[in-house]
Amino acid sequence: MTDNSNIRVVVGMSGGVDSSVTALLLKEQGYDVVGIFMKNWDDTDEFGVCTATEDFDDVVRVCNQLDIPYYAVNFEKQYWDKVFTYFLNEYKAGRTPNPDVMCNKEIKFKAFLEHALSLGADYVATGHYAQVRKVEDRYEMLRGVDNNKDQTYFLNQLSSDVLSKVMFPLGHLPKKEVRQIAKERGLATATKKDSTGICFIGERNFKEFLSAYLPAQPGRMETMTGEDKGKHEGLMYYTIGQRQGLGIGGPGEPWFVVGKDLTKNVLLVEQGYDNVYLYSDGLIATDVNWINETPTQAIVCTAKFRYRQKDSKVTVVPLDDNRVEVIFDESERAITPGQAVVFYQDDVCLGGATIDQIFKDNKRLDYVG
Amino acid sequence: MDPIYLDHAATAPMHPEVIKVINKAMEDTFGNPSSVHHIGRKARKELDKARYAAAKSIVANEKEITFTSGGTEADNMALIGIAFANKAKGNHIITTKVEHHAILHAAEYLEKKGFRVTYLPVNEAGEVAIEDVQQALTNETILVSIMMVNNETGSIQPIEQIGELLRDHQAYFHTDAVQAYGLLSIDVQQLGVDLLSTSAHKINGPKGIGFLYIKQGTHFEALHHGGEQERKRRPGTENIPSIIGFQKAIELVKENMSERMEKYQVYKQLFIEGLRESGVKFSINSSNHAVPTIINISFPYTNVEALLMNFDLEGIAASSGSACTAGSVEPSHVLSAMFGKEHEKTLNSIRFSFGIANDEEQVKRAAKHIAAIVKRLSKKEMR
């Protein structure tokens, strides 16, 4: 085995099984491993209990099992400024933000990376299901081999430069095997439940959480032809294509959110999963990031419009101002402004952008947002 | 690099002689001091000897010594025990903003129970003003609690003057002497204190043992209930091996107090000179009127977290203010009280504390390494 003992790898540890196994694998490969827990959110309750305390305790247990040093670092301020503020602003604008993409861009692979480098790290590692491949002097990001767990969607804003300092030791493993390794080695987090949802909301009620920061403005629900369908609780609580929680009874197929009219505070709903208003054939996205070279003309590739969705064939046309136009080969259902569109060439993630405007037959669908 | 321990104010290694007597006590003295038989009496004899040594070390009477599980318990007993026992006389308590959390959080608890607490400010040297104490006193005041030496800066408070001020007031006077004990000579009569907390592990004794001095005649309510031990003030079978170890530690620190003070003064000087020679930017937060074992230093253009982690990865153990729940570092409440809440010093200051684990060579070497790390980090931040 090559001697890795002079290579310092700082592992971002959340107290979950993935980052625990990440640290374990690197340790077994002989690296100089340091575990760091990021505290990005303060959810201390009235009894002084905070979930971060328990998660950090798990980090401590695992690091002691692996006999590696561990620390905690506080990024609450950066997280608030860069991620949470964006999150609220997007909701205010009637869109559906993706804080995980922003957290990876601004915190894990920026603030945390810089911090790790200040500790003399050669690399940072995380438990993401993605892979890094060096091709000559550039670094590509590939999907994780576990198709169901692939997390490149959330990592689309990374650059080749950043990737040159990143390790994803789980990228070539199926999730099942990761759990298996944790169990075999008796890691303290081997049977810990995977976290779900947005990290700062956790298991709590999303509506309740959001209403603490943004005043909810209840209004009417209407069909696209203006038929009144009752009351909504606040536009920010709904996303395009949503079925649950509308409370519209009556005969026929279920009802879905197809759009929002922000000026009138009206939630637009239509009947049927395959309702025509849910479909579009193109979009314009902003803040495009290309992990390696920026295309100068239209390229044909595949894209994901949300996490864990199958790839769709698209043509991407570069526009000015860091924008791209994405034209779908076949019409797509429930494209949602604020979410990421992420581009792939086979298994290579090319980059991504934030969905801004939606089109059908070259006409902008204003009602979507 | 060989590790260097500069965190004696957090806890100090046990003196080899302390370890020896504890080991022996664990073998020879297993009895319960309350038992009516020779095995128990043997333990009782050792307990009484230790209590005598503890009392003598602060010029007190043995009956005034209550062994506790350490400084935190002693502080809690002092605040809560006095507050509850003296409710009829008033509900006002005075303390400072720079106390240890064992005091501050106990005071907050008392606020929830209906007591009124005044948290006195300190100046930039971390010292409380006698006039402020005087002004805060009311007819309702039943307790004043002010630490003798601050654990983060080493600053020494004017306990004797405050004791003088309180001599004719109904309020009891408590001092948390955890960081002072073993370094400064303590005479409870001269200081005019009614209660005083100490902890063994700060003076090279074992962890989990300390004592609270409670002046005879003090109205005090026990927090725990059980047997007759410690005059019912702290029931529970006594931790004999630790108490015996504590006694040894007390005897050892008394032996050469002034020599040790001089030695640590030299360490402190060497450390500061080492940093100065390296040309690194720093300022000292501790006042001149401080114990020589603790020095609190601000390094501009750095932050505490990065400093401590880098120090540790190079083998240097130091610390900052209080650790937060998830292990990450919160701004120090002590430095906030000294310089203001948003002051950069609250986020870039480190406490170094010397003790028996150090020698001159180590202190010089530490200064060199620390300077190199600070230079590397501050360069990065200034970019």
Image (spheres, coloured by chain):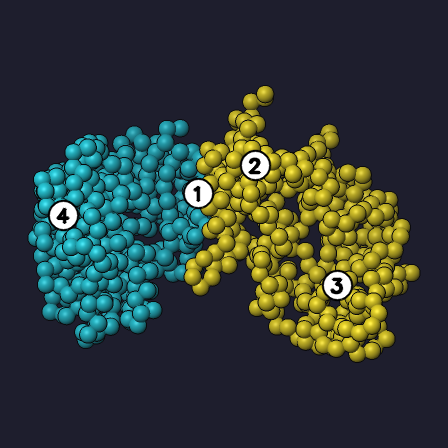
Chain colours: A yellow, B cyan
- Amino acid at dot 3: Gln
Hey, which quadrant is residue A173 in on the image? top right
**3 or 2: mark nearer the eye:** 2
- Quadrant in the picture for the N terminus of chain B: top left
- Tag 1, which chain? B
Comparing A6 with B61, the one in front is B61
- Amino acid at dot 1: Leu
**4 or 2: mark nearer the eye:** 4
Cα distance, mark 3 to mark 2?
37 Å
Image location (x, y in percent) of residue A137: 71, 31
Residue furthest to the right: A361
Q: Residue at x 59, y 21 (%)?
A: A2
Q: Residue at x 72, y 37 (%)?
A: A145
Q: Residues within 10 Å of mark 2 (few under 14, many from 20)?
A: many
Cα distance, mark 1 to mark 3?
48 Å
Residue A242 - label: 3
Comparing B360 with A177, the one in front is A177
- Amino acid at dot 2: Ala
